[in-house]
């Protein structure tokens, strides 16, 4: 079984982005705009299933997850086309909509549904929290009481919350290669899911280490700017907004490089 080299993946992700920064950034802007519309539409459709919170949340998550997944796999298609020596075009970002899409959709539905099942481990008290915006905004005291209530619930249920987060991270890692296998390698859904588990699980800590490095770098950057006070906070907000259009494609390209490291020569 091939091993993933996290530092190599981070370096390769950045190089791939920097070589075609304009194209990747433009696509990211487009995806963020689509996400805003998609979230609104999915939420509206989810209202139909408001008779059951789990079903409603699952329907919304599947709608958002499937469309977002098909769009995000475009980073990998573009990178693969660019590396093949052919002229990569903006349309390559949309190959997820035409390449083995049935299998890709099934993979995305399966991964979203599995992670949604894990949400049932969240304590019922937290699931039932409902912020009545009109009352809370009009009454600052009630707003503060609401946040105090959240704090108490979080402390009382810290074990369940950590378990939920731990399982989410685990599922996110072991299933992360399934969309790549389905869309780039034309594998069927079951085969793609099995491939992802069999390749990601032995490399679990290497993958986790790569994202911990990125998280640590972002955390240190944030901490240093906050030490500067108000000017640092302003710089932080501006840089985070601009950096979003860099971080999103780079993270997708890091995941793609990890996938390519596992492929046979």
Image: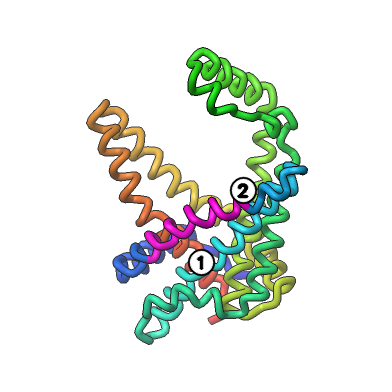
Residue at horizontal 72 percent and vertical 68 percent from the top: 194
Upstream in sequence: badge 1 or badge 2: 1
**Which residue is most to the bottom?**
86
Q: Position of residue 112 (x, y in %)?
A: 67, 56
Nearer to the camera, 252 or 245:
245
Residue at horizontal 34 percent and vertical 46 percent from the top: 241
> Which span of residues is magenta-colored?
27-44
Q: Left or right of 176: which side holds 115? A: right
Residue where numbered disc 2 is placed: 169
Residue at horizontal 29 percent and vertical 67 percent from the top: 22
Q: Position of residue 70 (x, y in %)?
A: 55, 68
Label 1: which secondary element: helix
Snapshot quadrant of residue 68: bottom right
Nearer to the camera, 120 or 209:
120
Quadrant where the N terminus is found in the figure: bottom right
Please rate how many residues cluster around mark 2, counting C-alpha atoms within 10 Å: few if below 14, some from 14 to 19, many from 20: few
Residue where numbered disc 1 is placed: 71
């Amino acid at each position: 079984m091939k091993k993933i080299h996290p530092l190599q993946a981070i370096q390769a992700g950045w190089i791939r982005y920097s070589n075609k920064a304009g194209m990747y950034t433009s696509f990211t802007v487009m995806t963020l705009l689509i996400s805003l519309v998609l979230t609104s539409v999915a939420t509206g459709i989810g209202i139909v299933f408001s008779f059951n919170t789990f079903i409603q949340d699952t329907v919304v998550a599947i709608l958002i997850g499937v469309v977002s997944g098909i769009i995000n796999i475009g980073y990998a298609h573009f990178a693969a086309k660019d590396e093949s020596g052919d002229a990569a075009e903006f349309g390559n970002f949309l190959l997820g909509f035409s390449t083995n899409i049935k299998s890709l959709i099934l993979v995305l539905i399966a991964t979203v549904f599995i992670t949604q099942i894990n949400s049932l481990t969240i304590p019922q008290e937290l699931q039932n929290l409902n912020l009545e915006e009109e009352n809370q905004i009009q009454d600052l005291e009630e707003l503060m009481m609401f946040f105090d209530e959240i704090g108490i619930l979080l402390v009382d249920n810290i074990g369940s919350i950590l378990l939920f987060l731990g399982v989410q991270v685990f599922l996110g890692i072991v299933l992360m290669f399934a969309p790549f296998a389905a869309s780039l390698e034309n594998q069927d859904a079951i085969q793609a899911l099995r491939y992802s588990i069999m390749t990601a699980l032995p490399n679990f800590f290497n993958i986790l280490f790569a994202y911990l490095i990125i998280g640590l770098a972002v955390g240190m950057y944030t901490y240093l700017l906050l030490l500067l006070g108000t000017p640092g906070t302003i710089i932080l907000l501006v840089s985070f907004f601009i950096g979003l259009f860099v971080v999103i494609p780079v993270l997708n390209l890091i995941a793609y490089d990890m996938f390519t490291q596992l492929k046979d020569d």
